[in-house]
Amino acid sequence: MKNTIKILMLIPVALSLIACPKKAEITAELPDPCREHKTVLLVQLKKEKLSLCKNGTAVKEYDVALGSGGFGKTREGDDKTPIGTYPLEKPRPSAGKVFHTFIRIGYPTPKQIAQGYTGSDVGIHGPHKYWGWAGGANTWLNWTNGCVAVKSNQDIIDIARWVESEKVGSVTLEL
């Protein structure tokens, strides 16, 4: 009962914050983040943005939530989002239906495994199934276990379709 009351008290707060911009939205307009990238998914970790890059131009951009432990993943359970360029697997329904769609990234690479890095099931997905109603609030805090999360199921569906239609084979996660 106490948990239900706490959740009900948080709903008006969450709804009142929906229109508030993220820190990255307040900054001045910057050059296209995709200018040095071909056709890839680009995640700018410090800006908490995911861009669909096609031939050096950003086609679309999304706010994201990252790992609650920051970035620079080296081991399973550190809750950090990895840095680097990784292959993308084909989008699929998430295991256990916790998230709508899941696009697994190839972390750790064979070279990282040789260096002792560990981890599995790092990917790009939408909100947790119980928080889909929260919309943009899903990207206000970095809450994942090392993944990249967008605000809605529709966003991850759109990204998955783009990955498949453009035959995007990699994601770059950079500072």
Image (cartoon, rainbow, N blue to C red):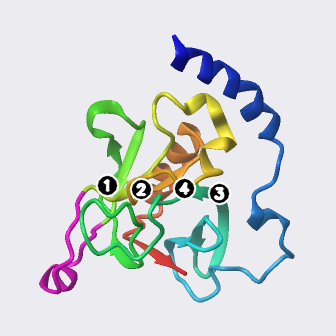
Q: Are marks 4 and 3 in contact (CB under 8 Å)?
A: no
Of badges 3 and 2, the one in the foreground is: 3
Residue identified by numbered label 1: 90
Say whether disc 4 or disc 2 marks the residue closer to the N-terminus.
4
Q: What's under tag 4, amino acid-wise?
A: Asn
Residue at the left extreme, as displayed: 114
Q: Is residue 20 left or right of residue 111?
A: right
In magenta, the rendered stretch is 106-120
* Helix, strand or loop for the magenta stretch, by majority: loop
Farthest front residue? 2
Nearer the camera: disc 1 or disc 2:
1
* For marks 3 and 1 on the same chain, the one whose residue lies earlier in the sequence: 3
Q: x, y (%) of residue 65?
A: 55, 55
Rounded to the nearest angstrom, the CA distance separating label 1 from label 2 is 7 Å
* Cα distance in 3D space between marks 4 and 2: 27 Å
Where is residue 79? Give x, y as percent: 37, 60
